[in-house]
């Protein structure tokens, strides 16, 4: 966290100068007045003002720290020691879990992983402030799953195109269905839609 | 396990000081009842029970290792 001290004729001038140097807005900093300064009399006994201006961490950095702390403690209490790392920006907090016993944390069809992600999202957004999305991956599960969904979509679409008959895929959650829809958007010979009710909602591939 | 249920409950509730967990051994399974302030019921259950379901999934995953059957209930503290 950056912090500077500025001396100027008045408090206001010192603050303006400090914000200028930090290239920050007033609501993004913490201001401490170290010396109010005094004008003195006819220039006698005058003292300049001194302020300390500290840049606050952006909200997404605060939320990243909260998310890592929360998930680390949660996994500890689940008796699955693991390391949580992450990054964040204005859009989302991205968390990675690595360790030995990760199968338990992923669960059937990633159900436990989805639940951990959901609970972490709720926990870090409970205090309010700007709402952030939390994406959680455990030992590359999501990355691999996305890859296999894409190739599954391609194979199924090729089949629909050559047979001219519709094909329903296995039920998937919203995030996974989105990956399939996206993947086949560019596929000329087919179109896709979702049918049914969660948790049985599935992507159907239709010939065009 | 009680620790885990309590930690999740306190992390999601607006009134963590009112969160309390009771464990009941029923032989074949242990039932953990998570008591929360009436105002917090919605925060712990969620739309269509979505939050309660996520809590159960996580607690059950943790129980796999210890080889016990667990069940989580959520109820109003009085």
Image (cartoon, coloured by chain):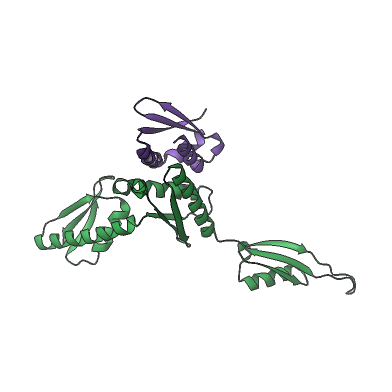
Chain colours: A green, B purple
Identity of the residue furthest to the front in this view? A100
Q: Nearer the viewer, residue A31 or A75?
A: A75
Q: Nearer the viewer, residue A35 or B56?
A: B56
Left-right relation of A12 to A62: right
Q: Quadrant of the N terminus of chain B?
A: top left
Left-right relation of B51 to A160: right
Identity of the residue furthest to the top in this view? B26
Number of dots carrying numbers: 0
Q: What residue appears at the point 46 percent right and 47 percent down from the top-left corner?
A: A122
Height in image: B66 above or below A196?
above
Height in image: A42 above or below B32?
below
- Where residue A6 appears, as percent x and y from the top left, is 72, 70
- Where residue A32 appears, as percent x and y from the top left, is 71, 61
Which of the 4 image quarters holds residue B45? top left
Q: What residue appears at the point 13 percent right and 63 percent down from the top-left corner?
A: A161
Identity of the residue furthest to the left in this view? A163
Left-right relation of A160 to A138: left
- Where residue A15 appears, as percent x and y from the top left, is 70, 68
Left-right relation of B31 to A29: left
Identity of the residue furthest to the bottom in this view? A43
Q: Nearer the viewer, residue A135 or A199?
A: A135
Height in image: B22 above or below A99?
above
Which of the 4 image quarters holds residue A56? bottom right
Which of the 4 image quarters holds residue A4? bottom right
């Amino acid at each position: 966290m950056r912090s500077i001290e500025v001396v100027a004729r008045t408090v206001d001038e010192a603050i303006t100068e400090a914000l200028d140097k930090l290239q920050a807005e007033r609501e993004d900093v913490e201001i401490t007045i170290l010396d109010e300064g005094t004008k003195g009399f006819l220039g006698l006994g005058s003292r300049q003002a001194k302020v300390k201006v500290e840049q606050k961490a952006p909200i997404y950095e605060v939320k990243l720290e909260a998310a890592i702390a929360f998930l680390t403690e949660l996994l500890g209490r689940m008796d699955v020691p693991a390391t949580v790392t992450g990054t964040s920006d204005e859009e989302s907090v991205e968390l990675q879990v690595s360790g030995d016993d990760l199968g338990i944390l992923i669960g059937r069809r990633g159900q436990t992983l989805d639940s951990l992600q959901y609970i972490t999202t709720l926990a870090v957004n409970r205090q309010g402030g700007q709402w952030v999305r939390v994406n959680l991956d455990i030992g590359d599960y999501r990355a691999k799953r996305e890859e296999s969904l894409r190739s599954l979509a391609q194979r199924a679409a090729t089949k629909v195109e050559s047979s001219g008959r519709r094909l329903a895929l296995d039920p998937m959650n919203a995030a996974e269905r989105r990956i399939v829809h996206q993947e086949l958007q560019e596929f000329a010979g087919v179109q896709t839609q979702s049918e049914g009710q969660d948790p049985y909602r599935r992507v159907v591939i239709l010939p065009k | 396990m009680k620790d885990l249920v309590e930690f999740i409950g306190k992390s999601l509730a607006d009134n963590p000081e009112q969160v309390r967990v009771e464990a009941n051994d029923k032989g074949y399974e242990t039932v953990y009842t998570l008591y929360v302030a009436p105002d917090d019921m919605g925060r712990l259950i969620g739309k269509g029970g979505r939050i309660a379901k996520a809590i159960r999934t996580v607690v059950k995953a943790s129980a796999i290792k210890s080889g016990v059957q667990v069940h989580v209930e959520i109820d109003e503290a009085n």
